[in-house]
Image (cartoon, helix red, strand yellow):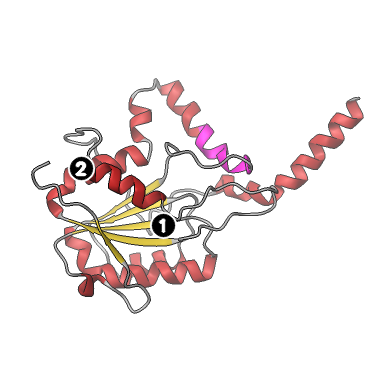
Amino acid sequence: MLTAGLAAAAALLVAVAPRLPRLRERYDTAALQPITGQPANDEGPATLDMALQDWVMEGAGSGATLFPWRFPAAPCPLACAVVSPTQRRRVHAFGYRLAGYHQLDTRSRLGGIAYRIGVQLRPLLWFLPRRNDEPWDDAWLTDVDDARLAALACWRPRRPTLIVLDTAAAGFAPRVIDALNAGIRRNGNRQPVRLLILGDIDHKDAASAAYRDFRDLPDQRNG
């Protein structure tokens, strides 16, 4: 019985071996800037929140595979959308929740450590589909330069990621999109990436040669 158990454990370890390097992956600060600070005013679910949730999840895939040595492909590896800068606080609150920071706010220090460990170990459970409340990586780019663009072109997402281009960086949208597409071509489409442009810009100004399909999200100036 013991021998059979050891053999099963060894077989499982061999099966998940291709996933073990993912446990060493860390947030890439050269390519991304994390969201900082708690939301100033989180008013809860609203039309824009629901639209954002639907948009990030559309084409994200389940994240599950039949075999542990296989990696799922996101049906839509990159999607882009534009929202008015008047919605900065609501977008900040959405990104904060999507990244799971609110989970850490409600936990003790020990509970927060346990939560982080669970998130880190999640890639080993190849058979579980992605939950709607599963934390994404996040980025809030207020400054984009050649170094960041080069890092984005080489960046390999460790998990689904939301990138917000704030008003100051919105004019870099075509170059950011080209860099992200270069990374997808290099690293594959295992993780969905969502680029949200926070600014009053025309789609033609934001589009790149490789990407022209933008989603306009609801502008709730009074909501």
Residue at screen point 68% across, 52% down: 18
- Name the residue nearer the viewer: 145 or 191: 191
Range of the magenta residues?
117-126
Rate crowding at label 2 as few (under 14), some (14 to 19) or many (20 or more) other CA atoms within 10 Å: many
Secondary structure at numbered mark 1: strand
Q: Is residue 119 magenta?
A: yes
173 sits left or right of 161 in the view: left
Residue 102 on image: x %, y %? 33, 31
Q: Position of residue 173 (x, y in %)?
A: 27, 68
Determine if the magenta segment contains residue 16: no
Reply above or below: 121 against 215: above
- Name which residue lies at 45% across and 22% down: 111
Q: Is residue 99 left or right of residue 40?
A: right
Residue 90 circle label: 2
Disc 1 from disc 2: Cα separation: 20 Å
Q: Tell me the chief SS of the magenta region.
A: helix
Above/below status of 28 relative to 13: below
Q: Which residue is mark 1?
A: 193
Q: Quadrant of residue 100?
A: top left
